[in-house]
Image (cartoon, rainbow, N blue to C red):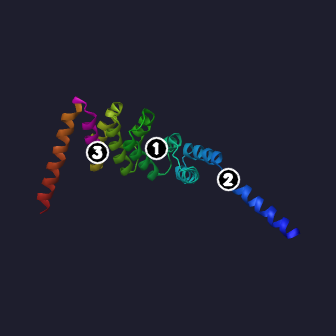
Amino acid sequence: MRIFLLVLVSMLVVSFGYSQGNDVGTIQTNIRAFSGGGKNIKAIDEYRKLFTQTKTHDTELLHRIVMGSLRDEDGYMKMAGAIAVGQLGGSTEAFPFLRDNLKEKDMWIRIWTAVSIGETGDKEAIPNLLYALLNDRVNFVRISSAIALGKLGDASVVSLTDLYIWAVIARSVNDEAIST
């Protein structure tokens, strides 16, 4: 009888501990905390748990994860956040973070941020894109900025963008001709 009670109590403790850490409310709280604290990889892991339990997507939590990605301490998460904002047609809430991320050291963050700005239509980012177009040391960042400026459709920069793209093409052809 004692063994039976011991096993029963053990099962209750294990099941209570499991449900305590994996109930929907706790998982949602964890997602909010991790996505706001620069730990989006953990927020994504928690979101997987939530989806496994509920089989439904929570758009508010997904939005928090995307927004948190733009501010994450991990460069890959920042890049993924920029891509997600561009794909999902980001909210204006994302615009200041995208503009800031054009200054990141990692070229891939800058490239995908420029692409995302072009997709989201943030016209206030035109000065940031122009700066990247004229000053970034990485050609792909400059080209992505030029394309984004073209997508934003500002008449004052479209001709500059066209000129820049043709200059890059001409330079590539010239460099190729010189090296052969």
Regarding mark 3 in the picture, which secondary structure is present there? helix
What amino acid is found at the position of numbered circle 2 in the picture? Gly
Asked whether 152 falls inside the magenta stretch, the response is yes
Asked whether 93 falls inside the magenta stretch, the response is no
Q: Nearer the viewer, residue 18 or 123?
A: 18
Q: Which mark is residue 115?
A: none
- Location of the C terminus by quadrant is bottom left
Q: Which mark is residue 21?
A: 2
Determine if residue 147 is in view. Answer: yes
Regarding mark 2 in the picture, which secondary structure is present there? helix
What amino acid is found at the position of numbered circle 3 in the picture? Ser
- Location of the N terminus by quadrant is bottom right
Rounded to the nearest angstrom, the CA distance separating label 2 from label 1 is 27 Å
Assess disc 1: are there few (<14), some (14-19) or many (≥20) residues with their C-alpha within 10 Å of its C-alpha: many
Determine if residue 102 is in view. Answer: no
Which percent across, then down, holds residue 161? 21, 38
Q: Is residue 107 above or below residue 90?
A: below
Disc 3 or 2, which lies upstream in sequence?
A: 2
Which percent across, then down, holds residue 133? 28, 41
Regarding mark 1 in the picture, which secondary structure is present there? helix
Q: Residue at x 41, y 38 (%)?
A: 90
Rounded to the nearest angstrom, the CA distance separating label 3 from label 1 is 18 Å
Q: Nearer the viewer, residue 132 or 115?
A: 115
The answer to whether 80 appears left or right of 33 in the picture is: left
Q: Which mark is residue 70?
A: 1
Rounded to the nearest angstrom, the CA distance separating label 3 from label 2 is 44 Å
**Residue at numbered disc 3:** 144
